[in-house]
Structures are given as C-alpha cells and as structure tokens.
Image (spheres, rainbow, N blue to C red):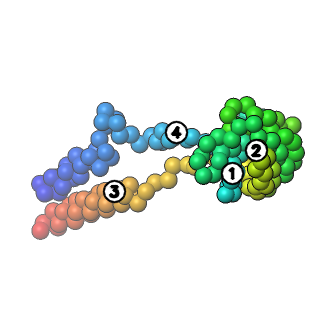
Amino acid sequence: MKQARALLLATVIAFPAWAGGDSSDGHTHAAPEPLPVGTLSPRAAAATEDFEVVAAIEGKKLVVYLDRFASNEPVTKANVEVEGGGLKGVAGEIAPGTYALELATAMSPGKHPLTIAIEAGDTADLLTATLDISPAATSEEHIHGWSERIVWIVASLLLLAAGALLVVRRRNKSKGI
C-alpha cells in the first residue's frame, strides 16, 4: 500500500512539471501572440537589357520604380506608359526614378498582366509584367504539435497505471494476500 501511495503522490507532483511550470517564466497555455506580419503591397517586376522595373500598388496609386539594368541608376525624365489590368495612362515622375499613376478604382484580386512602355532619351523599351493582387490572408488557428500530445498521452497512461496499481493492491489486501 505504501508503494501505491508513493506512486500516486509522485504522479500528482509530476503533473505540474509536465504542464510546463507557471507563467512567471513566460510559458503559458494561452494562444500564442501572433507574429508581426509585414505585408508587401502587390508587386510586378520586369527587366530587359536596358531597364529594370518594379511596379507596386501603394494606396490609390500604381508606383513604378525605373532603373538602368546595368548600373541600377534611377532613370529620370522618362515617359512611362502603363496599360493592362484596367489601367491605361502615363505615369508622372514623383521622385528620381519613381513614377506614379493614379488608380481610378481599386483593382480586383487576381493576376493582372501589365505592359509598360518606356522612353528615356534615345532609348525605348516595352516590358511586360504580371501584377499579382492576392486576396487578404486569413488568420490560422493554433495547431497543437505532436510533442504536446505525447506529453498528455504519457501523463494519462501513467495516471491509468497508478489507478490500476491501486485497484490491484486493494483486491490483494481484501483477499488477504
């Protein structure tokens, strides 16, 4: 009987250890804090031997970043025309190598092919890119890992074994063995 009590006492004492301690060490069983998510605006990129272009939706504008492919130098005073995905117009320069085109309406989710015509000095080029506007991501619920499940399974089996041992001891004692 002393062994059964000792086993039961050890099991009861060990349960808090399996639970991971208290919350003073930063460990809790509450839902984890969501990770900070840095969302990128929808983007499209294209390059030729003369130019490199990145187009991004920023607010209610399509912003086009235009650089020389060989030197990564911003291209200034260029004529940048954008067509496709419901857009058509000339993007105006807002900073060196940065051009913007106002969006009349918000673009719908999906993949939108864009054609970007560039004239800079005596160089002209036509680039194609696909602007991918993905629908907003949904948050995922917390999923329990295998290690957490194994701890609970082992604890449950130990508790059942302790209970079975107590029952066997009591039967043996009542039979006088």
Mark 3 lies on residue: 151
Name the image quarter holding the N terminus: bottom left
Could you tell me how far apart the alpha carbons at marks 2 and 4 are, in whole angstroms? 40 Å
Is 22 or 48 nearer to us in this picture?
Answer: 48
Q: Secondary structure at mark 3?
A: helix
Circles 2 and 1 in contact, beta carbons < 8 Å: yes
Residue drawn at (26%, 63%), measured in percent from left and top? 161
Whether residue 16 is visible? yes
The label nearer to you, 4 versus 1, is 1
Residue drawn at (60%, 52%), measured in percent from left and top? 70
Mark 1 lies on residue: 51
Circles 2 and 4 in contact, beta carbons < 8 Å: no
Residue 120 numbered mark, or none: 2
- On screen, residue 9 versus residue 32, left or right, reads left
The label nearer to you, 2 versus 1, is 2
Q: Position of residue 69 (x, y in %)?
A: 63, 51
